């Protein structure tokens, strides 16, 4: 059983038994709960912490856990209906409404209910995360002199140097800003490069988090169709000409959700077309460290061969490590770097130094390369297992491309299988999948789903998840 499921189930059981104790009454000891429910001490501790956060239990170090005193009646809720007018008062003067739809992002951030297989995740399963290496790095970082002091606003020089070496080419530490992960870096880049109300060109389909960031900034995402070789240059050029956009956001390597890798000729064309349009390319290089074992040599980032400063490069350590190691980088050249720096300072001052020190310790340790090799092999094995299971069990779902990197497969649904109905049916069958609709900035050409193989426990769970998805399809088409 997953630790997360165990904690949730134990908390549910203890919550149901609380009425057996009077307010202030002592609950059984942790040891007794371990023996009764056959769970680990860590599970008991986390379940009690959850009940404590809900105000149902009070824990006293050295004494145990006690039922909390009843809460006083909740204060009457105020009338917030006035906010609807206030938030929409300037809609008539806005070119693009700034209401934020985070549903496409929350699908990959929210854990499914206990017992539901997580095909909708966007992060590595705990068994794939370098937990011991991160714990050791955190311990070493905490012993560094000044570890809790104020860091340079641009980031630790050694960490900026490491990111610059990873990007390659002629990129130097002076071109790099350390950020609080990839998502804030994209938000900073879009705010720096495009004023509210203007268009921003995006791949179609593309990452919903980027679309949400663009719309929250008052920008208008304009889709540029892509195929198995990435964005189509002739359509990108036409989109720049038709819209007057000054920004194009792309994921040239193992694109989310399709897994496409931008063709070498197209890579040169994209930078050339943007330069001719007087525009920037925001390169989201999120999956470079999620390469599969059987992939060939990877193309260098667009930023590595960009002396003119057309490319603003984004990358992060979060995807190949843990959702909580939120450390990333922005790289840019020319006057735009100062604007990026100013926006980041205004928004967040700096990335906490202990987090930067931990990241630096981690990537500098021998455990780092071992972890990347293990993830590379495991992702390849999981990709193969999921693609094989889908071909055997669900041949009617079209899998146009199988990438040698990333953590997802992108499936086209037959016209007879409604996307929304399949999502609901899959959840009833015990498997959570990501809908395709949020990946399109305009009307999608067909129904799609995205399946992640990174957030599950292993290949056995992949096989079971595909079987459950078959059950959902049969329920809708039988």
Image: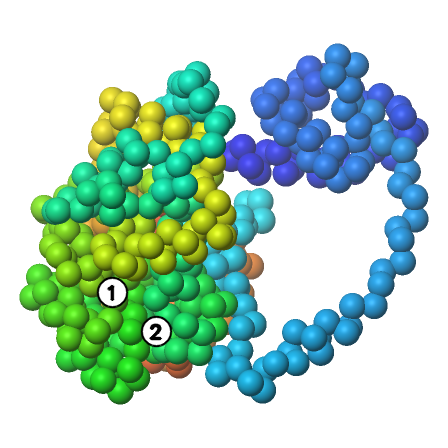
In this picture, residue 302 sits left or right of residue 57: left
Q: Where is residue 318 in the image (x, y as percent from the top left)?
A: 38, 42
In the rendered image, is residue 5 in sight? yes
Q: Which residue is drawn at 65% across and 25% down?
A: 44
Q: Is residue 429 above or below residue 58?
A: below
Q: Position of residue 74 (x, y in %)?
A: 88, 51
Instruction: Residue 160: name its quadrant.
Output: top left
Give the labeled residue for mark 1.
281
> Residue furthest toward the left?
265
Instruction: Residue 441: name its quadrant.
Output: bottom left
Secondary-structure class at tag 1? strand
Label 2 neighbourhood size at 10 Å, few (<14), some (14-19), many (20+)? many
Marking on residue 318: none
Q: Is residue 104 above or below residue 149?
A: below
Instruction: Residue 366: name its quadrant.
Output: top left
Give the labeled residue for mark 2.
200
> Which residue is nearer to you in this view: 28 or 75?
75
In the rendered image, is residue 204 in sight? no
In this picture, residue 168 sits left or right of residue 74: left
> Which residue is nearer to you in this view: 131 or 359?
359
Q: Position of residue 81 (x, y in %)?
A: 78, 73
Q: Residue at x 19, y 71 (%)?
A: 274
Label 1–label 2 contact, CB within 8 A: no
In this picture, residue 370 sits left or right of residue 229: right
Sequence-wise, the earlier of marks 1 and 2 is: 2
Q: Position of residue 208 (x, y in %)?
A: 41, 64
Q: Residue at x 42, y 18 (%)?
A: 145
Secondary-structure class at tag 2? strand
Q: Which residue is drawn at 58% across and 49% down?
A: 113
Q: Distance between the residues labelled 1 and 2?
A: 10 Å
Q: Is residue 172 above or below residue 232?
A: above
Label 1 neighbourhood size at 10 Å, few (<14), some (14-19), many (20+)? many
């Amino acid at each position: 059983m997953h630790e997360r499921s165990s904690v949730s189930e134990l908390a549910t059981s203890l919550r149901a038994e609380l009425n057996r104790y009077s307010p202030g009454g002592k609950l059984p000891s942790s040891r007794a709960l371990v023996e009764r429910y056959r769970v680990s001490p860590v599970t008991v501790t986390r379940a009690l912490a959850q009940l404590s956060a809900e105000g149902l239990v009070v824990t006293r170090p050295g004494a145990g856990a006690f039922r909390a005193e009843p809460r006083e009646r909740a204060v009457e809720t105020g009338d917030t209906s006035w906010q609807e007018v206030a938030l929409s008062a300037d809609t008539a003067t806005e070119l693009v409404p700034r209401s934020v739809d985070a549903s496409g992002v929350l699908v990959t951030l929210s854990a499914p209910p206990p017992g539901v297989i997580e095909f909708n995740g966007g992060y590595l399963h705990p068994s794939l995360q370098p937990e011991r290496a991160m714990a050791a790095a955190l311990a070493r970082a905490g012993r560094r002199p000044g570890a809790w002091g104020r860091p340079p606003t641009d980031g630790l020089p050694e960490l900026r140097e490491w990111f610059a070496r990873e990007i390659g080419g002629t990129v130097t530490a002076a071109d790099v800003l350390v950020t609080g992960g990839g998502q804030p870096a994209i938000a900073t880049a879009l705010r720096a490069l495009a004023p509210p109300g203007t268009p921003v060109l995006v791949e179609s389909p593309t990452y919903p988090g980027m679309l949400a960031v663009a719309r929250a900034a008052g920008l208008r995402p304009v889709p540029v169709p892509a195929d198995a070789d990435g964005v189509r240059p002739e359509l990108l050029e036409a989109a720049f000409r038709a819209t007057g956009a000054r920004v194009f956001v792309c994921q040239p390597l193992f694109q989310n959700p399709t897994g496409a890798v931008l063709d070498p000729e197209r890579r040169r064309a994209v930078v050339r077309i943007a330069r001719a349009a007087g525009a920037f390319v925001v390169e989201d290089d999120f999956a470079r460290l999620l390469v599969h074992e059987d992939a060939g040599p990877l193309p260098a980032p667009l930023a590595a061969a960009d002396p003119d400063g057309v490319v603003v490069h984004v990358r992060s350590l979060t995807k190949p490590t843990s959702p909580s190691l939120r450390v990333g980088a922005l790289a840019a050249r020319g006057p735009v770097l100062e604007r990026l720096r100013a926006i980041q300072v205004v928004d967040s001052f700096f990335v906490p130094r202990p987090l930067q020190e931990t990241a630096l310790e981690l990537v500098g340790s021998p455990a780092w390369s071992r972890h990347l090799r293990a993830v590379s092999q495991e992702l390849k094995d999981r990709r193969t297992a999921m693609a094989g299971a889908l071909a055997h069990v669900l041949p009617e779902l079209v899998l146009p491309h199988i990438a040698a990197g990333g953590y997802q497969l992108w499936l086209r649904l037959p016209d007879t299988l409604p996307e929304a109905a399949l999502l609901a049916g899959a959840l009833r069958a015990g498997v959570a999948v990501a809908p395709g609709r949020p990946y399109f900035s305009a009307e999608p050409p067909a129904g799609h789903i995205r399946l992640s193989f990174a957030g599950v426990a292993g290949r056995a769970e992949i096989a079971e998840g595909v079987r459950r998805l078959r059950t959902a399809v049969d329920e809708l088409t039988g």
